[in-house]
Amino acid sequence: VLGFGSTLYETFQNNPRLTDKLLEECGSRRFAKRGECDDAGDDSDKTIATWEKEVFAALQDPSKMVLGSAPACKYDEPAGTIQDKDVGQGAVAKGNNEMANYMMYLLVIFVVALAIWYQKTKDAVSA
C-alpha cells in the first residue's frame, strides 16, 4: 500500500492505514512496508522511490511469496494511528445532505434543459 496525504489534516493517512489493516484482517499478507507520502512535509519522491525498491525487491524474492510466510511487517509500520472520523454538522456522511439534494436538482434541471435544447435544435435542422 502506498498512501498520499498531508499532515495538515488530522486524519492523515487514515485510508491507507485502514486499508492495510483490513487487508491483513481479510487474510492478505504484506510483503512490503506501506509507504506514506506527506504533501506538507517530507520528500515524497524519496518515499516513493524507497517504497518502489522494497516492492520490486519483494516481488523478485520467491521466499516472500510463499503462502504462510511471515509478513514483512505489521500494519502499524511505519505508523498505525487510525483516527475516528467524525465529520461533524452539515456533512453528507452524517445524513444532512441538503446541499447534495440541491446539487442533484440542479443537475436534473440542467439535463432536462439540455435535452429540450437538443430536441429543438434537431427539429430546426430537420425543417
Image (cartoon, rainbow, N blue to C red):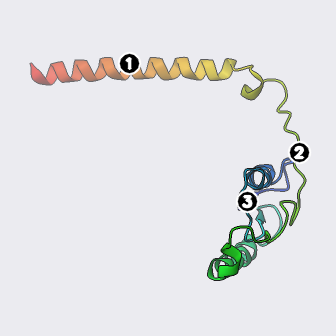
Q: Are marks 1 and 3 in contact (CB under 8 Å)?
A: no
- Mark 2 sits on what residue? 83
Disc 2 secondary structure class: loop
Q: Position of residue 103 (x, y in %)?
A: 58, 23
Name the quadrant of the N terminus. Answer: bottom right
Q: Is residue 81 above or below residue 88?
A: below
- Mark 1 sits on what residue? 113
Closest to the camera, between mark 1 and mark 3, is 3
Marks 2 and 3, Cα distance to the nearest angstrom? 15 Å
Residue 88, image quadrant: top right
Q: Residues within 10 Å of mark 3 (few under 14, many from 20)?
A: some
Question: What residue sits 80% from the left and 56% below the top?
Answer: 6
Residue 41, image quadrant: bottom right
Marks 1 and 2, Cα distance to the nearest angstrom? 44 Å
Q: Is residue 13 above or below residue 66?
A: above
The tag earlier along the polypeptide, 1 or 2, is 2
Question: What residue sits 74% from the left and 28% below the top?
Answer: 93
Q: Amino acid at mark 1?
A: Ala
- In the picture, measured across the screen, residue 95 lies left or right of residue 74, that is left
Name the outermost residue toward the front.
68
Question: What residue sits 71% from the left and 58% below the top?
Answer: 28
Q: Nearer the viewer, residue 95 or 58?
A: 58
Q: Is residue 97 above or below residue 60?
A: above
- In the picture, measured across the screen, residue 69 lies left or right of residue 56, that is right
Marks 1 and 3, Cα distance to the nearest angstrom? 41 Å
Closest to the camera, between mark 1 and mark 2, is 2
- Mark 3 sits on what residue? 3
